[in-house]
Amino acid sequence: MTAQDEQRDSVKWGDYLQSGNRIFIGSNAAVPNALIDDLIANSHGLHDIETVHILTLSENVWAKAKHKDLFKVNSLFIGGKNIREAIAEGRGDYTPCFISDVPRLFNENSLPLDAALIMVSPPDEYGYCSLGVSVDIVSAAVKAAKYVIAQINPKMPRTNGHSFVHVNQIHSWINAEQELPQIIAPVMDRRTEQIGQYVSMLIDNGATLQIGIGKIPEAVLTYLGNHKDLGIHSEMISDGVIDLMLKGVINNRRKTYHKGKAVVTFCIGSQKLYDFVDGNPHIEFYPSEHVNSPVKIAKNDNMVSINSAIEVDLTGQVVSDSIGYQFYSGIGGQVDFVRGASLSKGGKAIIALPSTTKDGKTSRIVAHITEGGGVVTSRGHVAFVVTEFGIASLQGKSIRERALELIRIAHPKFRDQLLSDVRKHYWVPEYQESSPSSVPELGTIEMKRFNFADINYTLRALAPADERKLQEFFYSHNKETLIMRYNHHITQMTREKSCNLVSVNQHTDLALCFTKKNSLGESIQAVARYYYIESINSGEVAFVIKESLRGRGMASTLLGEMIAIAKIRKLDSLVACVRRDNGSMLKVFERAGFVRQPSEDFDEVSLKLALTEAETVNTETH
């Protein structure tokens, strides 16, 4: 008799299990709850059954205290109230591991399985059931377990890829219809949207993405609507990919591995998502040992991994499975994909998190890891850390540079303390006195993208973390540029001098820059600033643009931004002094409305832009 022609509503558990056995329970949205209920109802004489699983979207009844004599939880990824309580109370265990390694644990007797309890679709005419929305480590469990016991669920979608199990691999089963658990996309708050916007700025056209579930990944997807030719190679997908695939934004056309296909191990979301993957030839589900293999992930050029964290210390160490001594989630696929993205040609490993806890009382950018917390991702793997306050670029950075980058994206109310703390632990010189300040007038996202001559540049505020970048920018200038900018030939820009120039009180003065992305982050291409003159409520403007980029509109764009900010700050005017032989810069100012003023220095031209009506009258009388 086969599953194709016999209906069953119970399993003879005594034929397959005995006390002390280890069983695997299906993952994510494919938890075979009817099988678990049947086992509990017919568990006569069974004790101390160890349950092994990752995230399970279920009530997780086997983890309840009333079943502690029957079941012992061993979770490879913690999720759900009952699982978390069982582990916290010592009735269950947490086994940290990389998801890509789990199949090896099953096969090499580290975690041998006596039975795998899984959910599948009804078999097709050829006798093949589908693992549906959860192939992940379920596939490996099916291959490794002595017995495979299935809940055949007509609500389970049939997915493409390596998701199929033949009925002759199934030793027993029950037929039980069960709605798949749904997770509805969370409502976005302002800071989550800001994080999503910043992360989207790091994603280039043609990139292949790994995305998780939750507010931040959904926010990232929301801001990818204008991207082109994106691909998916991800442990999971959720509802956010649907519209992007339907619009052709995600088309997998430029992938260099599994070209033309979105590759995943499981999906979690709404019924709309489950219907979308049902029979969809453009999405293929593969086992975790394939999708999560760092070597195979790296076969995708421009691979971008996007993961979250509980806290990040100022050296770039990432804590993501524990809150102090409390184990909260798990390693999951984070390290697999961070490593894979790091190995990928043009790849980026991104960690995105809010700058504080929900109540705003605790910074999640920390000087040192909370006691009891464990490092999941090392400081050597992460390329970018993103909060609602910006992007910290860590790749190729020294400890000092990392600390300053991360302080820049911490919540402003914690920056001074973090800078003070960092002096106690890392080498940050005494001259580094100022923590970064923001320029809210730039907008909700304090970065803007511009394109000059078909190359993308980012406009943002200068910050203390730019000390080395500004020094490099200075040494890229020729003698003529230095004379035009500083009025004499300066030959040295010390780190201390550079630090003074980037440590700007942006609430009174203003310093902006254009940066260009490179393989290790970004380099400065142009700088504009004004120094506030309190006595006349004015700002004195100065610029320097990289020689090869002049004449493209950078100076005019920067000047336009400064004028707009000066008006918001209610300055009466902006002034500038330009060498008389610097004709190109004079044109920039005069096109913006600056008027020449009397000057005592024949070699310089004084210019002024009135920003108020009264100041306009005053300017015209000179």
Image (cartoon, rainbow, N blue to C red):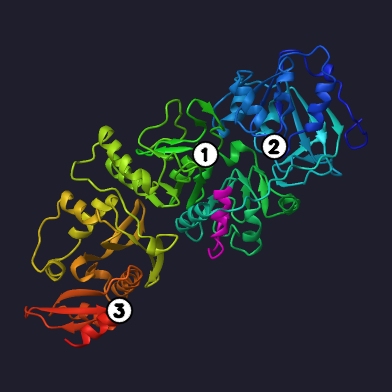
- Residue 109: x percent and y percent? 62, 19
In the figure, is residue 402 to the left or right of 128?
Answer: left
Decide whether residue 61 is among the magenta residues.
no
Q: Is mark 2 on a helix, strand or loop?
A: loop
Above or below residue 608? Residue 296 is: above
Above or below, comparing residue 18 to residue 552 in the picture: above
Amino acid at circle 1: Gln
| Dot 2 and dot 1 residues touching (CB under 8 Å) | no
Residue at 6%, 81% (x, y): give it: 602
Q: Which of marks 3 and 2 is in front?
A: 3
Res 577 quadrant in image = bottom left
Identified at 30% across, 78% down, the residue is 612
Graded by Cα atoms within 10 Å as few (under 14), some (14 to 19) or many (20 or more), the crowding at tag 1 reads many
- Residue that label 3 marks: 612
Q: Mark 2 points at which residue?
A: 57
Residue 330 vertical position relative to residue 523 in the rendered view, above or below: above
Q: Do the residues labelled 3 and 2 touch (CB within 8 Å)?
A: no
Task: Determine which quarter of the picture holds residue 254.
Answer: bottom right
Q: What stretch is highlighted in magenta?
A: 215-233
Q: In this view, does 353 lie to the left or right of 100?
A: left
Q: Which of marks 1 and 3 is nearer the N terminus?
A: 1
Q: Quadrant of the C terminus?
A: bottom left
Lower position in the chain sequence, tag 2 or tag 1: 2
Q: Which residue is tagged 1?
A: 334
